[in-house]
Image (cartoon, grey):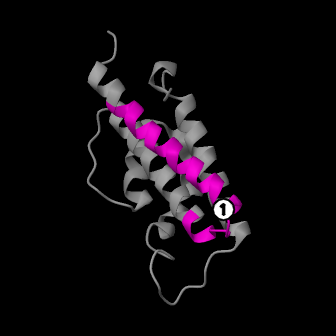
Amino acid sequence: MPPDPLVVQETRAWLAKADEDLSASELCPHARRSLPATATYHAQQAAEKVIKAWLTWHGLTFRKTHHLIEIAEPSLALDPTLREPLQAALVLSQYAWKHRYPGEWAAPSKAEATEALTLAQRLYRAILDRLPSDVAPG
């Protein structure tokens, strides 16, 4: 049976937003002023949205959350081969809130921002590889 067009559309929309966040994270080091905190935030957002795309594709609902562990667990139940990229990306959860507002945390380094982007890209590719090609954003 062909997939539900609404599920395809919603999954593609999540993937497109994840792709936008990856692009934003990639651009941050090249801004007039380096933006590692913004880069790490967008890396977290990309990971969150690609996981939500995966859950959407499989018909699973999720509550609004930035805690990757909460949405990673059902994702892993769907495909245990996602364990490595999902577990590696869990560290990104902190960037949903850390460094977003003034506080006690030191700003992330450029190296930390690069690593965050790498983790998000790896998870994005791993999930995209497991979805039908017609779901990929155009």
Where does the magenta region start and end?
10-38
As drawn, 35 above or below 124: below
Residue 12 appears left or right of 123? left
Residue sitting at the far bottom: 104
Q: Main secondary structure of the magenta part?
A: helix
Q: Decide if residue 29 is in sight here.
A: yes
Residue 12 is one of the magenta-drawn residues: yes
Residue 24 is one of the magenta-drawn residues: yes
Q: At x 50% / y 68%, what residue is drawn? A: 95
As drawn, 87 above or below 77: below
Q: Which residue is mark 1?
A: 31
Identified by mark 1, the residue type is Ala
> Residue 51 location, x and y as percent?
44, 45
> Residue 83 location, x and y as percent?
55, 47
Residue sitting at the far front: 32
Residue 3 appears left or right of 54? left
